[in-house]
Image (cartoon, rainbow, N blue to C red):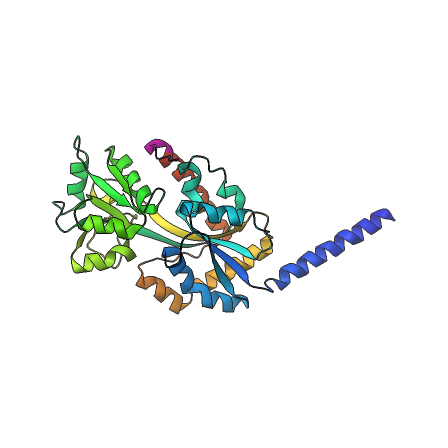
Amino acid sequence: MKFIVKLASGFAACMLAAAAHAAWPDRPIRMVIGFAPGGASDIAFKMVQDELSKKLGQPVVPIYKPGANGNIANQAVATAEPDGYTALWANVGPLAINTYLYKGVELDPGKAFVPVTQLTDSPLVVVVPKSSPFQTMEDLVQTARKPDSGLSYGSAGHGSSMHVAGAALSLALGAPMTHVPYKGSAPALQDLIAGRLSFMVDSRSTTAPFIKEGALRALAVSGDQRVSDMPDVPTVAESGVPGFKVTTWQAVVMPAGTPQPIVDKFSAALRETLQMPEVRERFARIYTPLVGSSPEAFAAFWAKERAGAKTLVEQARLQVD
């Protein structure tokens, strides 16, 4: 009799769980963003917010928790109830780099979160000021390989995609170059345009206006192929650094323990939203290619990115306090 009661209780619990999954979502979903409003992550989220909310039948609302290059948001989501009503919109820094870059960061994103979907994957562009003697990427590469080249590159801060890309280039060339971190991309670009930095590896959306007006010169893109909006600009790999590839990406994850049916439903809604023509057009305007992968595909990509970040941080000795 006890066995039958337990069996019935277990069956009832499963039925309740299935019903809860089927009803999800029945209230607003919190999308935690680890950077301030108006930044790249917020801009990208706003491009899908309305359409995603309509698909889910519930508002998807941004919750901003900026600071520590996304680590504060990571912690908030990792400790949230895994009920499908909290998600994290993050980039390569918080999801792959920070664990190895910052001393004292114990949170392992690969264990703390479950993958939902990779949203974007965008190459960066190597830019120099119009006053630079470097006319091509080959010019920069040849100078960098000279002893005491004195080259410097700016970034939006430790752990930013610009920092990682610059460090990866320095490592690939076997040439030490000085990293100058700033509190954001804008002040770094100002110093670059003024000639106080040698180069930057920054996003196309940020640098495009300055390239168009002639204040900056594009030398190469950091992906494995040229981009349609700059077809005459070669890749870094084509310019004397074979195999070089660094991209910046954004993705959505949820707390570990979130039921898989909810993860799958959320992933499907995100992917369908990214396929909408109006959404694709918005991202095209900021030179950001969309991905929209399944949880399984993103999991494989994410694991490789974390392994690559660990190797880069160790070999380039990038760890900071």
Left or right of 293 in this view: 173: left
In the rendered image, residue 4, in percent from the top left (x then y), is placed at 84, 50
- With respect to residue 274, does 98 lie above or below? above
Residue lying at 41% horizontally and 37% vertically, measured from the top left? 102
Which quadrant of the rendered structure holds the C terminus?
top left
At 63% across and 59% down in the image, what residue appears?
A: 21
Residue 9 shows in this picture: yes
Find out whether residue 250 is within the magenta segment: no
Most prominent secondary structure in the magenta stretch? Answer: loop
Asked if 316 appears above or below 36 in the picture, the reply is above
User: Residue 166: percent from the left, percent from the top?
Assistant: 28, 41
At which x and y percent is residue 223? 30, 48
Instruction: Give 275 or 278, whichever is nearer the viewer.
Output: 278
Report how many numbered discs are placed on residues in the image: 0
Q: Is residue 219 visible?
A: no
Q: Is residue 211 above or below residue 92?
A: below
Q: Give the range drawn in magenta.
A: 314-321
Residue 315 among magenta residues: yes
* Left or right of residue 116: residue 204: left
| Residue 29 point in image, percent of width and height | 54, 60
Which residue is found at the position 14% from the left and 51% from the top? Answer: 130
In the depicted structure, whether residue 262 falls above or below residue 135: below
Name the residue at the top extreme: 147
Question: In front here: 87 or 247?
Answer: 87
Name the side, left or right, on which 275 lies relative to 196.
Answer: right
Please tell me which residue lies in front, 28 or 169: 28
Quarter of the rendering containing residue 144? top left
